[in-house]
């Protein structure tokens, strides 16, 4: 699964990292979420929940 975070849209709330820490990490320097391991979506199954809970819809998933 492909995972993209739109850094222009991300407000750095950290919710995606709380929900799915194997995939997302909030970069403390720029205050934006980074994808650290998109392959982890497949075995953790938490990427959809992160996408649904992003308050600004900055996360996009694609097969
Ligand atoms: S949940 Fe959305 S806005 Fe919040 S850090 Fe993650 S990508 Fe950014």
Image: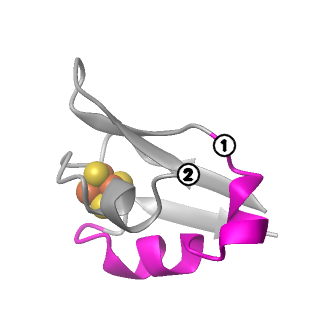
> Label 1: which residue?
37
Q: Which mark is drawn over residue 48?
A: none
Q: How many marks?
A: 2
Choose the circle earlier in sequence order: 2 or 1: 2
Element type where label 2 sits in the image: loop
Residue pictured at 56% horizontal, 74% vertical: 46
In this rendering, position of residue 60 left or right of residue 15: right
On the picture, is 5 further left or further right than 56? right
Residue 31 falls within the magenta-colored stretch: no
Asked if residue 32 is positioned above or below residue 54 in the image, the reply reads: above
Residue 62 shows up from this direction? no
On the rendered structure, is 23 left or right of 56? right
Q: Are marks 2 and 1 in contact (CB under 8 Å)?
A: yes
Question: Measured along the vertical axis of the image, is residue 59 above or below residue 51?
Answer: above
Name the quadrant of the C terminus: bottom right
Which of discs 2 and 1 lies nearer the camera? The answer is: 2
Measuring 64% from the left and 67% from the top, which residue is drawn there?
61
Other residues around mark 2 within 10 Å, as few (<14) / some (14–19) / many (≥20): some
Q: Which corner quadrant holds the N terminus?
A: bottom right
Residue 24 drawn at (x, y percent)? 47, 48
Dominant secondary structure of the residues highlighted in magenta in the image: helix
Residue at the spot 17% in from the left edge and 53% down from the top edge: 13
**Disc 2 C-beta below 8 A from ligand 1:** no
Classify residue 53 by image quadrant.
bottom left
Image colouring:
one colour
Q: Which residues are magenta?
A: 37-56
Report the residue marked by disc 2: 22
């Amino acid at each position: 699964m492909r995972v993209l975070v739109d850094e222009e849209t991300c407000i750095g709330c950290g919710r995606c990292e709380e929900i799915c820490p194997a995939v997302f990490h909030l970069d403390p320097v720029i205050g934006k979420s980074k994808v650290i391991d998109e392959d982890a979506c497949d075995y953790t199954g938490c990427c959809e929940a992160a996408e649904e809970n992003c308050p600004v819809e900055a996360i996009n998933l694609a097969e």
